[in-house]
Amino acid sequence: MIYQILPWSFLDTSGTGIGDLQGIIRRLDYVASLGVDAIWLTPFYESPMKDLGYDITDMLDIDPLFGVMKDFEELLSIAHDMGLKVLIDQVWNHTSQLHPWFVESASSRTNPKSDWYVWHDPRDDGSPPNNWLSAFMGRSAWQWHLGRRQYYLANFLPCQPELNWHNPQVLEAVLDLARFWLDKGVDGFRIDAVNFFVEDPALRDNPERTPEMGLPDGISPDNPMVRQQFVNSFCRPEVFERLPAIRALLDEYPNVVSLGEVTLAEDSISLSGAYVQGDNRLHLAYNSSLLQDCPLSMTMLREVIERTLSNFPDQGQCWMVGNHDYGRFRSRWTGTDQHGQPYPEVAYHMMAALLTCLPGALCLYQGDELGLPEARIPADIPEDRIRDSFGKALYPVLPGRDGSRTPMPWVSRAPQQGFTTGGQPWLPIPRRHRALAVDLQTNDPSSLLNTWRRLLHWRREQPALHSDAITVLETGEPLLAFLRGDSGGRSVFCLFNTSGRWADFHPSRHGLVDCPLQPSLVIHGLNAFGEDHVCGGVLRCPPYGALVMER
């Protein structure tokens, strides 16, 4: 179980309005109380901060916004003392255009790093080498450099030039970066945009997308880049040829883990599964299949779960329902039930139970354990306070990513909800987050925060949930049911109602008649399920109910 921390928005101890490493240290006890195994820190390296720190100028040092190296070393030591592993972001696909590597590469066509980035001459008419579009800007991914009289590739922001992974020197340099942090004692890496590492060496155009093709998971139909199929600019099979060297380095260090981000792929589930095939690729990967902006649906959940399980071996999947690049989980999956009513609070408790019971790793983004809704633009974040470059470029067509990046509400009645001792936070904190603050939910036994705590601690104590074995049962709408088990014969039966109406489950139809079931976990109240065990008959599941029973 991994808890993602966005340093910008976790806790500010310096009064700058921006969170810092000391803020993370101060709240590590809160993180440990959740029952998670590890934290993932988004970038805290030296950066011009054009893209939340994903535009890096020095990956071997701490940006003064967040502290100094001594702060990170203290954080690492305290986290380890608490039994928490520490994963840090590694951005190996691109750098800032102010990075010394790029400055040297751009200085001439003959310098030692001239081929460390993706450069190409213009076409005869001076236009870019091909039709590739930027994932962020909706226009050409190629940027003209006056000094070199060439274009460089930038799949994200113009200030984020792509490293040339066709050059073996780049791989060696990346491994040196990784080795530095592994020697510091980190427990692994979340590898940013791993499916972007390699582009088609022939620079062939991307084909146009036809209406009947559909869209990649997690991308808005309003994003201009959806006009193309992303088969040449990224998602190339050549990436797999680079992974063994990365894995070999990681394997030199005991108990280190790698988590790859696979995003904007035409089939994100199958592609992300390929990144963990065998023992010479990554340990874990996640995709955007559960990051879609769509209402809660058993049909969608069943399809995603079954396809994910069939594409991932040995728990290589990491379930991800929210992060800093997508809208808040609660707001994305908000819809209406069969009566046109918004989902009640218990629906999110049920979803927490479902995610907890799935095989593999689970990543929880800070604030999602509180059920924070998306900050709205301009209602919560005025247009002149937008910080996300993607949002600035495409607003109002697309709102950008600031809505999921607002600061954590720690204390409901404190100024700035306890996030900062200074004045204005870097992003406004929505007033409606005040009622969901950590202090209020901590004191409410029925809160979503305490449900997550109960679930995660309970998960640790369930041997049947530690294996990769799962059998999804054919239940039909609106129920989702599966069996989990381990090699020792212990198993659990998991049942979830994804609707606002009562639903009947017939154990006899699934071979459960002669197997006594003892309730282990109940969401929505044990009394709603009737007897304390089931040996046949009908099990009535209340609206948005969750039941786990030991066999």
Image (spheres, grey):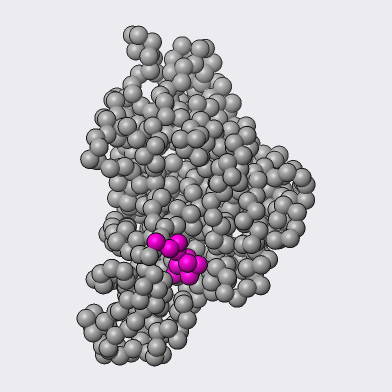
Q: Is residue 16 magenta?
A: no
Residue in the foreground of this view, choosing between 182 and 376:
376
The vertical placement of 182 against 33, above or below, is above
**12 left or right of 358 in image:** right
Residue 142: % across, % down: 42, 22
Residue 345 inside the magenta-drawn segment: yes
Name of the residue lying farthest toward the front? 339
Q: Nearer the viewer, residue 42 or 417?
A: 417
Residue under the point 39% across and 37% down: 222
The residue depicted at 33 percent of the width and 64 percent of the height is: 298
Q: Is residue 344 left or right of residue 337?
A: right
Query: Measuring 57% from the left and 74% from the top, which residue is drawn there?
Result: 446
Q: Residue at x 38, y 53 (%)?
A: 294
Toward the viewer: 437 or 9?
Answer: 437
Q: State the image coordinates of residue 435 (x, y, percent, origin top left).
A: 64, 62
Depth check: give the residue in front, 474 or 246. Answer: 474
Residue 47 visible to the viewer: no
Q: Which residues are magenta?
A: 340-350
- The image quadrant that residue 519 belongs to is bottom left
The image position of residue 373, as x and y in percent, is: 54, 55
